[in-house]
Image (spheres, rainbow, N blue to C red):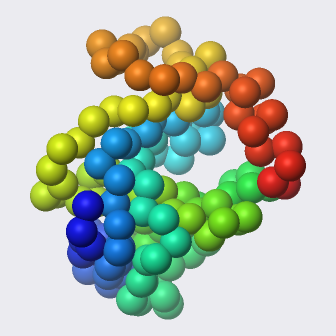
């Protein structure tokens, strides 16, 4: 998908991505659910991301393999950034005009609470599968 431009709610942080994958993922881990009040719906944006307004971006190291970024002015969740590759996963809602969106993967599927479910049939990875995947990347 061609590049996309977006910003946080207040406009203090502007983001330009070179590539947004319309096959989005959903993470059910406790960190994501605590961070946003529900599962994290994310599009993969690769590492070719330009961020303007760095003074308003706060990074939080949320695990040994990734950090989360948010706007210090309005609180908008901006990204989940992988430490090893520098790749960004950004909230799908930041990009209001994406075409061809398709839920493709659910992470930490064994941590999905019983009070919600999705009818979409997707690939899933459990906590054990995620930990094995990131074991060599920590």
Q: Is residue 26 visible?
A: yes
| Above or below: residue 129 compared with residue 20 | above
In the depicted view, which residue is nearer to us: 86 or 14? 86
Name, please, the residue furthest toward the top.
Answer: 114
Residue 42 in percent (x, y) is at 41, 48
Q: Quadrant of residue 8?
A: bottom left
Residue 79 visible: no
How many marks on residues? Answer: 0
- The one nearer the camera, 54 or 126, is 126
Apparent side of residue 19 relative to residue 108 in the rendered image (left or right): left
Tell me the residue at 62%/70% (across/down). Answer: 86
Q: Quadrant of the C terminus?
A: bottom right
* Relative height, residue 124 to residue 137 (above, below): above
Question: Percent position (x, y) of residue 85?
Answer: 66, 66
Say which residue appears at 34% left-offset and 60% top-offset: 20
Q: Position of residue 27 (x, y in %)?
A: 51, 35
- Reply above or below: 115 against 75: above
Describe residue 117's horizontal placement relative to residue 3 as left or right: right
In this picture, residue 98 sits left or right of residue 27: left
Give the answer, above or below, for where 137 lies relative to 106: below
Q: What percent of the width, then of the height, locates residue 127?
A: 71, 26
Quarter of the image with the N terminus in it: bottom left
Left or right of residue 23, residue 2 in this image: left
Residue visible at 32% across and 78% down in the picture: 16
């Amino acid at each position: 998908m061609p590049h996309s431009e977006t910003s946080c709610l207040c406009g203090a942080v502007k983001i330009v991505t070179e590539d947004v994958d319309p096959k989005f993922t959903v993470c059910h881990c406790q960190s994501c659910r605590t961070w946003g009040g529900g599962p994290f719906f994310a599009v993969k944006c690769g590492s070719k991301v330009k961020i303007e307004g760095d003074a308003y971006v706060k990074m939080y190291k949320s695990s040994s393999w990734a950090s989360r970024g948010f706007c210090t002015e309005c609180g908008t969740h901006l990204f989940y950034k992988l430490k090893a590759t520098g790749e960004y996963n950004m909230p799908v809602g930041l990009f209001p005009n994406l075409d061809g969106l398709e839920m493709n993967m659910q992470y930490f599927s064994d941590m999905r609470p019983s009070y919600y479910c999705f009818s979409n049939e997707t690939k899933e990875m459990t906590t054990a599968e995620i930990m094995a995947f990131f074991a060599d990347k920590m």
